[in-house]
Image (tube, rainbow, N blue to C red):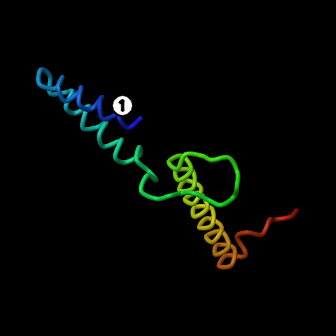
Amino acid sequence: MGTLIILAILVLVVMGFSNPVWWLAAAALLYLHLRYGRTGQGSSGSSSTGGAPRSAGSSARFDSSYRAYRQRRDQQARWERRYRRERPWMTRQKRS
């Protein structure tokens, strides 16, 4: 997949000699490829679960997105606990 992206970037650069807008498209594609397309290639990302083997890129991308989700969830829980602790009168429901 990375080879196709690089080939597409090269084609856009060559087409850019007649129309410089293609260079902008090539730069945008290169940025997206470097930012999102190469996640996890440097790390092994393997686990000893004994399950079916998965590609390291998709596993690492899933691990990092799940880790980010857990961090956001835990931060939200900490904020909610702090809010309830500092403002107990605001969290009580009014009963009529």
11 up-or-down from 35: above or below: above
For the C terminus, the image quarter is bottom right
Work out whether residue 13 or residue 6 is closer to the camera in this orientation and state it.
6
For the N terminus, the image quarter is top left
Q: Residue at x 55, y 59 (%)?
A: 68
Q: Position of residue 72 (x, y in %)?
A: 57, 61
90 to the left or right of 75: right
Q: Residue at x 63, y 72 (%)?
A: 78
89 to the left or right of 69: right
Q: Circle 1 sits in a helix, a strand or a loop, which is it?
A: helix
* Residue type of the residue flagged with mark 1: Leu
Q: Position of residue 39 (x, y in %)?
A: 44, 50
Number of numbered labels in the structure image: 1
Q: Position of residue 27 (x, y in %)?
A: 24, 38
48 to the left or right of 32: right
Work out whether residue 70 or residue 13 is closer to the camera in this orientation and state it.
13
**Crowd around label 1: few <14 · some 14–19 · many ≥20 (10 Å):** few
The residue carrying mark 1 is 4
Q: Residue at x 69, y 73 (%)?
A: 84
- Residue most toward the top? 18
- Residue 2 falls in which quadrant of the image? top left
25 up-or-down from 33: above or below: above
- Residue most toward the right? 96
